[in-house]
Amino acid sequence: MNRNCRNCGNQITKFFSLGDMPLVNSFLKKEEISSEKKFDLSVGFCSRCFLVQLMKTVPPEDLFRHYLYFSSVSSAFLAHCKETADYLTERFSLTPQSLVLEIASNDGAQLQFFKEKGIKVLGVDPAKNIAEAANKKGIPTVPEFFNAALARKFVLEQHICADIVFGANVLAHVPEIVDFLTGVKMVLRPKGTAIFEFPYIKGLTENKFDTIYHEHVFYYSLLALTNLFTNAGLELYDAETTWAQGGSLRIFASHPGTFSKTNAVKDILAQEMKAGFDKIETYQKIEENAVRLKSELTSLLTRIKGEGKSVAAYSAPAKGNILLNYFGIGSNFLDFIVDYSKAKQGLYTPGTHLLVHSLDEIYKRHPDYLLVLCWNITHEVVNMKELHEYKKGGGRFIVPIPEIKII
Ligand SMILES: [Zn+2]
């Protein structure tokens, strides 16, 4: 199976195959289990522009058919949004004449903080029900996929040009990425800046392989992004790491020659060259490490079960479903699974078909161990007041990533 790079057209080389995987955000009703579809999930590398990308993408109608919407109303997320709005307003001296255009703006969680400051805002989000909710809240939102055709319409028909184009967790999801960025260039004012946040590829090289799933078409290094933005007629001039998703990158791009490149860009590029992000050998280690973790975790679970002890999984995030399916961990090792989200409770997990319970199940069945699948927030989980009694009763936690740890 060969295919060409979605940025430069060069032939890409596969370095990690997870096999056929279910869609990890598609939780199932009982009657849907027998017709569940699986799709190849493998990742390749372009040796010309260094872009890491899926070998094969899933048709959107399959990807989004069962998509559950989980609004991110956590106070930590909203605090991050407010902080972002304060920071960008000050850094770019935004005024009531400025326009902030957000792509994949969801229900307006981010834009509301710009609007509060009297700055003009516009959202774009393909989910009609979510766009509707945002419009009701007073955040104007266009219910479309953002691309060059939509950008052309904005500019030519509606005379919309943005001082800031913002997108969090969208850049990795768009298969036609060059067309998307061409659209960004079209709507960006001459001195405007486009800002994107997304998971940084460094995580993959630190054993966080479970962030590979069908929705994530691209896994970005700054090296690859520099080439990609150049191809779309944009220039990347600043970058910083943020806390979001346990290791994200925030990048700043403009029309070429508008701003000078910061030292941060030069430093990160130098670090990436040193770490070998321009070589396929670096990425080939990801599979080796995932195979080793699989063997270590299944050995541990075999031993625990052999001692007659019980194990439940704590939470069923997308990455957790990748881990369970790739490691072959289901009802063979797990007594049950719980998740905080009411939207998932009562449904079955993709691929492993475990019924998702509420946290109450922990107190009904008293498992000896909880396998923490949302390992990026282990500290929060271990200190949750809902799990205080579990810990007091001798309950332990198994953290699978980046290295296996028992707490
Ligand atoms: Zn390429």
Image: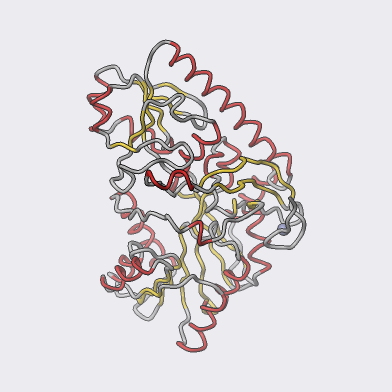
Question: Residue 98: percent from the left, percent from the top?
Answer: 40, 78
What residue is drawn where x is 51% and y is 54%? Answer: 198
Left or right: 81 as drawn, with respect to 259: left
Question: Residue 114: percent from the left, percent from the top?
Answer: 33, 68
Residue placed most toward the observer, 311 or 231: 311
Question: Residue 270: percent from the left, percent from the top?
Answer: 67, 48
Q: Is residue 23 above or below residue 134?
A: above
Question: Residue 79: percent from the left, percent from the top?
Answer: 31, 53
Q: Quadrant of ligand 1?
A: bottom right
Left or right: 49 as drawn, with respect to 37: right
Q: Is residue 385 above or below residue 51?
A: above
Q: Quadrant of residue 391?
A: top left
Residue placed most toward the observer, 263 or 193: 193
What residue is drawn where x is 37% and y is 63%? Answer: 106
Q: Quadrant of residue 309?
A: top left
Residue placed most toward the observer, 306 or 314: 306
The C terminus is located in which quarter? top left
Left or right: 386 as drawn, with respect to 214: left
Q: Is residue 163 above or below residue 379?
A: below
Left or right: 96 as drawn, with respect to 219: left
What residue is drawn where x is 42% and y is 68%? Answer: 125
